Amino acid sequence: MILKIDGMKAIVLAAGYGTRLQAVVKDIPKSLIKIGDRTILDYLIEQLDAVGVIDEIIIITNSRFFSVLSIWKDSYRGSKRLQLLSDGTSRLEDRLGAVGDLQYTVKAAGINDDILVCAADNIIKFRLADFVTAFCQKKHSMVVARQVEDIEDRKKRGVAVLGDDNRVLEFEEKPEHPKSIWTAAPFYIYLGSTIPKINEYLDAGKNPDAPGHFVEWLCTKEPVYAYTVDEQIVDVGNPDSLARAQTLFKQA
């Protein structure tokens, strides 16, 4: 049985500065890099448009990239309400971090609903609609997880230890000694009742940067489950991963 939820907000984290890619893409955000004939953000928003329970998409960026993303927003012809926010930063040194941007967005938009949080710089082949369906059945906060055999790759990611029911028993961001082959992708669903814990986490002086740090803390406070996928996921963070993303969509 699928439980009904009243509404869900999608938050797209697009406030990074993409320093490792600037030599290739110049002064544009990673989310607007073209993969084939469309941007990474185009692919993501198309998926979010297909999720019926989402009633609004909120993109959080920085002041440096706000104007170029505003031009992209003006071209949006999808079915959802779409809001673009700036976190007010203009330099890498002043960035809020992913968790800081999540906190900023929730407060600025007055969000109390369940939230689907997505990185804006990943090319994915799994369906976000299926992820949301799994959440509606489980009704607990969830993270996307995928098996990665390469141990050096795992050391660069969030690694989850899963129970028989895919509950996240342990989670560690960028571990030196990974305890599992399950790695997290930056796609999360949090209950509306979990939202106050974002403030609790940051008020405790925890790491505001990589979103996996929040998951690592959260799974010690409440049940968090993994939605496991087999499909490829490419984090477009450097020239090599950009090339992999281009290859991935040529094979589509």
Image: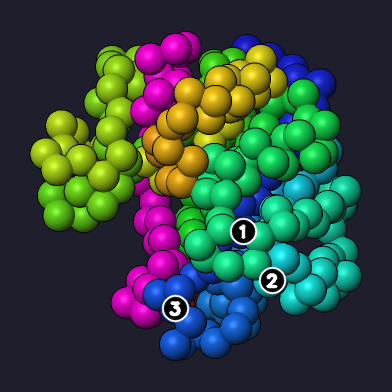
User: x%, y% of residue 135?
Assistant: 57, 25
- Whether residue 229 is situated above or below residue 96 in the rendered picture: above
Q: Nearer the viewer, residue 32 or 124?
A: 32
94 horizontally vs 186: left or right = right
The residue where tag 2 is placed is: 65
Q: Which residues are magenta?
A: 215-244
**In the picture provided, is 163 more to the left or to the right than 66?**
left
Check disc 1 and give the amino acid type. Answer: Ala
Q: If you read the primary sequence from the N terminus, does the residue marked by circle 1 or circle 3 appear first?
A: 1
Q: Residue 74, image x and y in percent?
A: 88, 70
Quick one: 104 or 171, which is closer to the camera?
104
| Mark 2 surroundings: few (<14), some (14-19) or many (≥20) residues within 10 A | some
Position of 214 relative to 236 (above/below):
above
Pointer 3: what residue? 21
Label 1 Cα neighbours within 10 Å, binned few <14 / some 14-19 / many ≥20:
many
Give the CA distance from mark 2 to mark 1: 9 Å
Q: Callout 1: helix, strand or loop?
A: loop
Alpha carbon separation for disc pair 1 and 3: 14 Å
Q: Residue at x 48, y 23 (%)?
A: 204
Query: In the picture provided, is 243 more to the left or to the right than 102?
Result: left
34 inside magenta stretch: no
Q: Residue at x 46, y 46 (%)?
A: 209
The answer to whether the residue labelled 2 contacts the one labelled 1, judged by CB atoms less than 8 Å apart, is: yes
Residue 14 tag number: 1
Image spot of residue 215 (x, y percent) = 43, 29
* Whether residue 79 can be seen here: yes
Q: Does the stretch in magenta take in 228?
A: yes
